[in-house]
Image (spheres, helix red, strand yellow):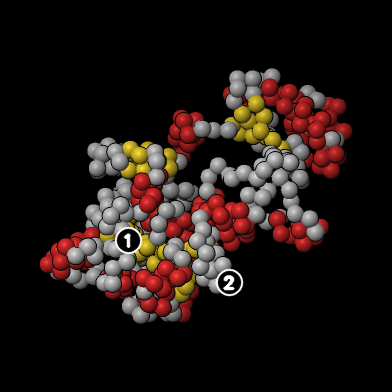
Amino acid sequence: MSNGPLSGVRVLDVSTILAGPLASSLLGEFGAEVIKIEHPVGGDPARLYPPLEDGVSSGWRMLGRVKRSVTIDLHHPEAAGLVGRLAAAADIVVTNFRPGTLRRYRIDFDDLRAYRPDLVMVHVSAFGRTGPYADRPGFARVAEAFAGLTYRTGEPGRPPVFAGYPVADGVTGIYAAFAAMLALRQRDLTGEAQLADIPLYEPLLRMMEDFVVEYGATGESRERQGNENPHISPNNLYRTRDGRWLALPASTEQMWRRLVKVMDAADLAVHDSMNARLEHREEIEARVAAFVAAHDLDPLMSLLVDAGIAAGPVNSAADICADPHIRARGSVMEVPDEGAGRPRLMQAPAGRFSGFEGTVGRGAPALGEHTTEVLRELAGLAESEIHDLRHRGVV
């Protein structure tokens, strides 16, 4: 077990796919012990999302790391009691089933706090536990559409498009880990059980600072604008001479002045306010695009960095893994994979801290790898009882 700041905290992960498992992974990377409950046949559906390597999803290797795997068939009448006994030994339960599903399985908040009166439950669902949509099914893409992110993503006059990653799952997974810390703190202050109700769409809606407030001020919804920003010009992705792409947002007056100087474009200096640049956006974008297109990416990056201009390459995964800054900070790492007999390359825990660090003490487990030891240690079952449960398909 890690000696991180969450050492001694035990998390029971009764969730699937991405948002819930991401939340518990983040807690595990900073010291929490994480026990993952999976179906005995197939396990978490995320195990089988392509691409597969050695029969296991690459994404699952990220979501499953730092966890112990216990199989329990939640449909079985005896499953609720088993989950309850494990919850009695846990501080936090993370789940992302629909509210009605938790009630049907008899593992909802009220059910589990009967086993542990000061339990913290973090419940991620598509639409939350209250309101007319509470029991609707939903995944990240549904939440992104519902929250307005999809509406505003895409080119002007063209259909909306999804982002290149299920943003709602990622944002909500991080927010759910944050919610777990808030609820744990409140539990420690009051001694009372805590329920954090986190819909997939709400953290996403909160993240888009300008969306609702602009509508409240103008009565108009922000429309799709491609890479353009209604508040900033220039702000785009520009193609370089060697066929790569550069992100270049001149978000401040200082950045604009530096860019004009590097471009040797004194005539553009007359656009000395953001409003002026927005009025001449088309001309400015064309000039910046032409400037970037005349340079290869690497020497252009050196030129811009030396001038103090914020810019960056559009990186592929290969670019990221080869980047000297990524390597120097350890932003990617090798994690042991006992099943494969070799380490796996994956993202490291985010952030660096003065008094502790995030760690990945174990790779993703095999399905049910720890069922016997966990049921013996935490549920107090004898080997014969576990064998009987396995024989009857409960675990």
Per the image, label 2 sits on a secondary structure element best described as loop
Q: Quadrant of the C terminus?
A: bottom left
Residue bearing mark 2: 131
Q: Is residue 142 left or right of residue 347?
A: right
Q: Is residue 5 above or below residue 271?
A: below
Determine if residue 215 is in view. Answer: yes
User: How far across and how far down the image is residue 201, in percent?
Assistant: 57, 59
Determine if residue 386 is in view. Answer: no
Amino acid on which the number 1 mark rests in the picture: Ile
Q: Nearer the viewer, residue 139 or 234?
A: 139
Q: Is residue 123 left or right of residue 307?
A: left
Mark toward the viewer: 2 or 1: 2
Residue bearing mark 1: 37
Hey, which residue is sitting farthest left in the picture?
Answer: 384
Q: CA distance from mark 2 to mark 1?
A: 28 Å
Quarter of the image for residue 87 reads bottom left
Q: Residue at x 77, y 26 (%)?
A: 287
Q: Residue at x 36, y 74 (%)?
A: 106
User: How far across and how far down the image is residue 196, in percent?
Assistant: 49, 69
Quarter of the image for residue 127 reads bottom right
Q: Residue at x 23, y 60 (%)?
A: 371
Q: Is residue 345 left or right of residue 342?
A: right
